Amino acid sequence: MKCFRKNHMMTLLMVVTMIISLPLSASPTRTGDMSTSSEKQETAVQSHRFTGWYAGVQGGIPFGYSSFSSFAADKTYLGFSATLLGGYRWSNLLSLELQAGYGRITMGQLECCANKGYWLGEDGGPYITPILGMNGWHESNLKSEVSLLSGLLELNVNVLSLLPSLRESRWRVELSPRAGIIGTEAKVKTIGSGEEAMKGDRQWQWAAGGQAHVSYALTPRLDVGLYSNLTYIFGDQIDGLPKRRHEGNHLWESGLRLSWSFGSDRAKAAYEAEQEVLAAEQARLERERREAEALELARQQEEAARLARLEAEREAAAKAKAEAQRLEAERQAALAAADTLPVTPVYFAFNSKSLSRRERVKLQSVADFLQKHPDVKVVVHGWCDAYGAKSVNRRISRQRAQNVRMHLMRLGIARERIAVRGRGSDYRAATAALARRAVTIETRKEAQR
């Protein structure tokens, strides 16, 4: 049993997982509370196929595991099977199905036993070495050809019907416990010559297991799908060999499946009734949607009017405030104009401390005012933009203020009347060009700052 588990159980799990996940990945996800009328009509047609009698066929490739296995040491033997099926579906969830099948499989010695020298005597007994005076064969040179007849009953459970979003899907994934009888007839032959070593009688034994299959409705009546099943046989080994080393005695099969639903008048009446219910539900949802849209439109219009009113009030308040500030500024300017040093900033090029000719002309008005008022002292503030290190910018800003003082001294203003300050980087200026400047301020105004 360990040989089968090691090499093939993962393969079986992968096949079953692929079968179950196929419709989940292929089915579209629906969002919202409503679907279109065409989608609802398609859903109703799909519901119509889910009840009543049905029949079909399935065929696939079976593998056996007993004393010998289809996954033998020398090769993997592929079998074949064909099955007729019929059943009754009560709902989208449950159906009961009867299957009658025929198939053939071939099995050989497992890899784990190939090098151990096991020997089969003509009496059917298992030996670890040949027996003197008895004909027999090395098991590594034997294969078992088995014909299969089966009659099984399945209870199918459609797991997609448990998911609201996939309940009425064209896809169906069914997990099915199964039980019944299987008849086997084994012929043990040599691998090389095909000589018949042993032949057993057909024996009927109880069997049980499970099947998973996924199908898709091509039409409301016709389904096509894939299946995979595992069936355990209770009793003698299916390969006709003695049971001694391996405890397994089962069949694994995978293949294709077709089924045809016959339907019934009762299902048709249910379909028509469901159509009427769906139409009424669609009309109700459409009416509720329109009412909700009308309410939302009215709310949006009311909110837009309120916001427009608030914006108009805000703009009016801002204009009134700006007008009051303008009048106050004019009043203050009128009071100070008579005896106030004109605030005339001079600007510098990037990374420069020198005054351009145009900027030196601006300082003439400052010099004229200081000559007219010999008792006034001033402070020159130098600034830099925000680029560069703070220590460097503080040094350059002071040098700019010193250059302004030197030019005022050339225009006849005494050095002791002019103080200088380096203010460093100006982070509040609108642009870097406006930040690179020097401003001359009266000492009394400087005290007020």
Image: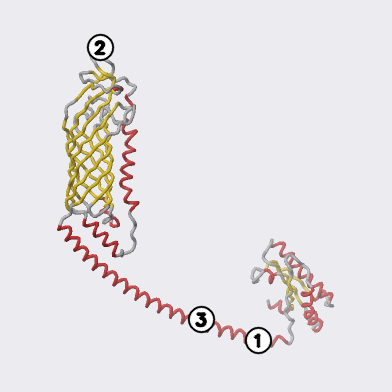
Query: Which residue matches tag 3?
Result: 314
State the separation of the CA atoms marked 3 and 2: 116 Å
Q: Amino acid at mark 3?
A: Arg
The amino acid pointed to by label 2 is Leu
- Where does residue 305 sit, x and y in percent of width and height? 43, 80
Q: Nearer the viewer, residue 346 or 368?
A: 346
Q: Position of residue 413 (x, y in %)?
A: 83, 77
User: SS of the residue at dot 3?
Assistant: helix
Asked if disc 3 and disc 2 are in contact, CB closer than 8 Å, the reply is no
* Amino acid type shown at disc 1: Glu
Disc 2 residue crowd, few under 14, some 14–19, many 20+, Cα 10 Å: few
Residue at image mark 1: 330
Residue at 19%, 44% in the rendered image: 85
303 left or right, relative to 362: left
Give the residue pinned by disc 2. 132
Q: Residue at x 20, y 18 (%)?
A: 123
Relative to 142, residue 418 above or below = below
Report the residue that reaches farthest toward the left.
265
Q: Residue furthest top?
A: 133
> The C terminus lies in which quarter of the figure?
bottom right
